[in-house]
Amino acid sequence: MNAGPELRILANSGELAAEAADLFVWLGSQAIQNKGCFRVALSGGSTPRALHGALTMPRLAGQVDWEKVEFFFGDERGVPPDHPESNFGMADATLFRPLGVKQDRIFRMHGEAKDQEQAAREYEAGLHGQFGTKPPAWPRFDLILLGLGEDGHTASLFPGSEALRERTRLVVPSRSPKGVPQRLTLTVPIVNQAQTVVFLVSGSGKAAVVRQVLEGRETDRTRLPAQLIRPEQGRLIWFLDQAAASELVLSKQGLVSHEE
Ligand code: 6PG
């Protein structure tokens, strides 16, 4: 049985980004102190831009030994790295370049590959290589950052998709019903092995799906993939601004705990 999610409700997206950045820096410092590295999977989409901006501010950027941070991705779209829709491209512009992160610290998913199965297996092999694990052991990320789509998807795990049923692979090809269809994504089991999983959700447009995911009945979790994210030993923290949390009822009184 794992503890329910921790909710942190912030006044606005700026405060959400600042609070999440503080947690990122704290987790990073702990991991680097304890094992000499900090392995994080970044989220795609637009919400993480503000977090990245907060991390590059001198107050925080100076607190992390970025040479010891290894950057991975939760998912990638089927576009080249310099494409406006590329998750790598967004992170490169808003985080890697401003911080001067060296190429050997960045592990990009080759979403643009023609052979998606091969690209997925190569990234999976790369994870095992970097984490020093072999199947059936699972690489354990120190932190996985996730967003939430209005349909309840997270990473590129979309409602009703085959990828949601994957129990052994770390990375699989996936198809998005909107935007760039070709995707690569981490699977549910690898996310649920992480030490800490953080959802970053901002804006009133997400309020309805936030309530469904956090307070709705869990009849069919493949309908709301974000409900499948339950770290087995790790922490699950939802950073919400008040707009995204505006339809929550029970959770605000701390009355909801998702028991297995
Ligand atoms: C992606 C992300 C996706 C994103 C959500 C929320 O590649 O698009 O992995 O899961 O986090 O769609 O996106 P926004 O932050 O843009 O609302």
Image (spheres, helix red, strand yellow):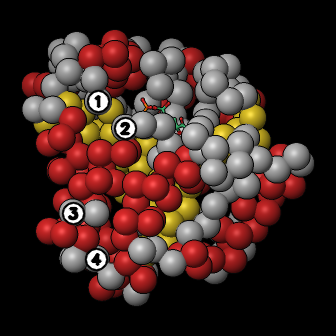
Give the mark nearer the N terminus: 1 vs 4.
4
How crowded pointer 3 is (Cα within 10 Å; few <14, some 14-19, many 20+) is rated as: few
Q: From the viewer's perspective, is 216 left or right of 251?
A: right
Q: Select label 3 or label 2 by which is in front.
A: 3
Q: What's the distance in space between the residues labelled 2 and 1, CA to CA?
A: 7 Å
Q: How crowded is mark 1: few (under 14 residues within 10 Å), some or many (20 or more)?
A: many
- Residue 202: assigned label: 1
Residue at x 76%, y 47% (from the top left corner) = 112
Residue 61 in percent (x, y) is at 25, 71
Q: Where is residue 200 in the image (x, y as percent from the top left)?
A: 33, 39
In x, y percent, where is residue 219? Answer: 51, 15
* Mark found first going from the N terminus, 3 or 4: 3
Under tag 3, what secondary structure?
loop
- Quadrant the C terminus occupies: top left
Ligand 1 is within 8 Å of the C-beta of the residue at disc 2:
yes
Residue at 48 percent of width and 37 percent of height:
45
The Cα–Cα distance between marks 3 and 2, rounded to whole angstroms, is: 17 Å
Which residue is under mark 2? 47
Q: Which residue is the site of mark 4?
A: 64
Front residue (pair 125, 257) = 125
- The N terminus lies in quadrant: top left
Looking at marks 2 and 1 on the same chain, the residue that comes earlier in the sequence is marked by 2
Residue located 89% across and 48% down the image: 115
